[in-house]
Amino acid sequence: MVCCPHCGHTSIDVGRSRLARLIAPLVHGAKRVGRRADGVTLADIEPGRSVVVEGFCAGISEARRRQLEAYAMGAGRPVTVLQQAPVTVIRIDRTEIALESDLAAAVLVRS
Amino acid sequence: MHQAAAGGGFPFRAIIALVGQPNVGKSLIFRALTGRHVMVANYPGTTVEVSRGAARFRPGVEVLDTPGVVSLPANSEGEEVTSRLLLEGVLETLVHVGDAKNLRRSLLLTIQLAELGVPMVLALNMMDEARHHGLSIDERLLAERIGMAVVPTTATLGEGIANLISEVEEAQRPHLRLTYPSEIEATLAELATRLTGLGAEPRALALLWLSGDPVVAEWLGDRLADADLAWIEERRHVLQLAFTEPLPSMLHAARLAFVDDLAAAVTAEPTTGPRSWRTRLGRATSHPVWGLPILALVLYAMYWFVGRFGAGTLVDRIETNLFGNVINPWVTDVVTRLSPFELVTDALVGEYGLWTMGMTYAFALILPIVATFFLAFGALEDSGYFPRLTVLTNRVFRSMGLNGQAVVPMVLGLGCVTMATLTTRILETKRERMLVIFLLALAVPCSAQLGVVMGLLAALSLTATVIWAGAVLSVLLIVGWLAARLMPGERSPLLVELPPLRRPMLSNVLLKTVARVEWYLKEVVPIFLAGTAVLFVLDRLELLPRLIDAAEPLVVGWLGLPAAAATAFLMGFLRRDFGAAGLFALAAAGILSAAQLVVAMVTITLFVPCIASVFMIAKERSWAVAGAVTAVIFPMAFLIGGVLSRGLSLVGWGA
């Protein structure tokens, strides 16, 4: 509980609740804290935000890269993140795609 | 046109080929174009199936439905087959079936296909969904820019099909020429000079070669002299040095730029999509929190439909009323009268009779259960729910070295493990398929057995069912984890499209169910009957008691069961539910204690499901693999049974 010293108004401090912090990722979708050295990736984006793809990290496999490209993902394309848990779900054009967070972390984006 | 190299020859005289990404409605278009005589066959040397049918609108013309391609160059077995068909086929016309509401994605493939130089038509399918999203497409402008006829269609409603047919009949070579960066164009021109006279468009071959397509590489390897091969190798290498990005990405970027431009020019779209209840439901099904209660609901619905209705009501009606009271007495009567020898009578309608045991079991007990399962499964499949289930279950499968896509064969295994083994083809790598086939054979109880096991254990107590379920599930997870460690190879991370949820189409579901039931009857029942015959012979030759004696140390000593249970296990070798039913009889007679029953059930569940599934493993992989799987599974089942038996007696439960 947080208490205002002046008026005595009290409210719940969600940040203090260990239980709330535990289930928050489930409810909101997991947020990766911190940025990778090479830049912001799809795995770092909150659900509901739209970003633009910049490119792919070197770590991505050739096959997966081709598959993502076939969905019209490429530099300059807008992508909306729908979920981050249990896996990353994004929307490109009108296609929804689910991919593991490790894969999502190989896609570089900018806001 | 070109004929394939010696050693097989190209088997299909395909004339019109349908190509497209998965989930675009290609098979509906295929059905709309073909008549009743459709043949499904394996592309030689693969497990990929290709459908051919006679065109409804012109005699003597064949339509070929290719496996879905996400992109070329080929990444999976299905894509390789399509690639090969396009290269080697006697193609008159190519029909690209695209998704109208995902124009960019579809056009990316259209361009690649157009480069092949075959007369082509683009069918933009699912126009109804595009309209629902508020999209409007200027097909005339689009047709002009890509140099081929564009036909909007909605295959589910039959719209645009007549138009499509008339355009297909008059299809022309597309005049579309995408210009790539100048260095690439230069190399393309050079390569094209060496790649002429091979029976395919030189520029297309050159483009596929530059993108590293394995099918084309092999194809060229068969047809070019070594010197030429080395030369085109070198040209590609030199070209790559001029860029920092890999060549395939350069090509892709050029195509994407063109497609972006084009899509912007021909579509007028609203800025926001519709927030229908369907999108929201779709969201919820893969949501980490809401997805689970929805899944529980779906599972309960399935349990009710297959377990209560199928295994309960239907089986009752058919087994007791139809077979028990009407058919079997009549057959027994007829056979006894007509049969010349008592041996024959016994073989057909005796205790281990082909009819009284084999056929009755197949049709009265198993068929209703399996049919209801396939019906429920088909409805779920058609609604598009399974990809969302892949999302929810991905983490569980991760620990087993798989990804969420394994959930589909596993769920189907709850219906029929033999069929599920076949379905492992949808998995991408051989490693994944092997792992899932093994787990299916070990720890997934098929619906026939589930029915018997649940009925038996539920009658006993809830705890017994929980112990059984817990034991089997633990085995699945632990063995899965172990097997993943032991099997060499990388895990493939999940990447799957989530098509929109939709109301399952009854006609689709019915057709699929009928096809699956027919398959089941043709593939499984004969082996089933063979199993019955084996039991009959064993009984006749009075070998059964001897085999029971031989099994005694294992069944009595290790598993702690009475000697009579050995017969049930013997039957369990041939078919798990035979065994379960045998145990049922023992339990009803009060010979088995609760703990013994649970131990016996767990052991039998862990057996290889049935001879039919072993045959299927042999067909899908090889007899060596089938043998290895069987050799590992039976000892494992007994081992775990014995451990459970000791565990339960230690805890003092159910004595």
Image: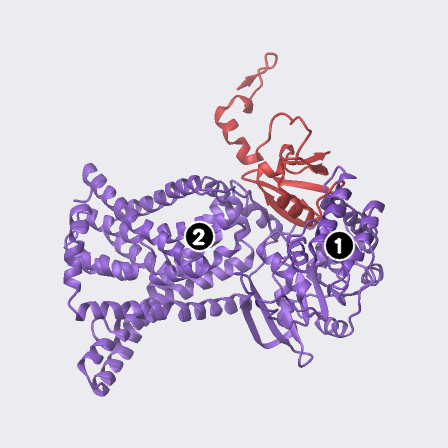
Q: Respond whether the residues carrying marks 1 and 2 are from the same subunit.
A: yes
User: Residue B340: image x %, image y %?
Assistant: 20, 86
Locate the N terminus of chain B and report the quarter of the image it occupies: bottom right
Give the colour of chain B: purple
Disc number at residue B206? 1
Give the colour of chain A: red
Residue A84 visible, this angle: no
The vertical placement of B260 against A3, above or below, is below
Q: Dot 2, crowdedness within 10 Å: few (<14), some or many (≥20)?
A: many
The vertical placement of A58 against A97, above or below, is above
User: Residue B323: image x %, image y %?
Assistant: 29, 75
User: Residue B166: image x %, image y %?
Assistant: 75, 74
Q: Dot 1, crowdedness within 10 Å: few (<14), some or many (≥20)?
A: many
C-alpha distance separating marks 1 and 2: 42 Å
Query: What's the chain of the residue with tag 2?
Result: B
Task: Looking at the image, tell me whether mark 1 or mark 2 is earlier in sequence order.
Answer: 1
Locate the C terminus of chain B and report the quarter of the image it occupies: top left
Q: Nearer the viewer, residue B548 or B592?
A: B548
Q: Name the residue tied to disc 2.
A: B410
User: Residue B276: image x %, image y %?
Assistant: 64, 52
**Residue type indicated by callout 1:** Ala
The vertical placement of B546 against A13, above or below, is below
**Residue type indicated by callout 2:** Met
Q: Nearer the viewer, residue B448 or B127?
A: B448
Task: Kindly check if marks 1 and 2 are in contact, taking CB atoms under 8 A apart as contact.
Answer: no
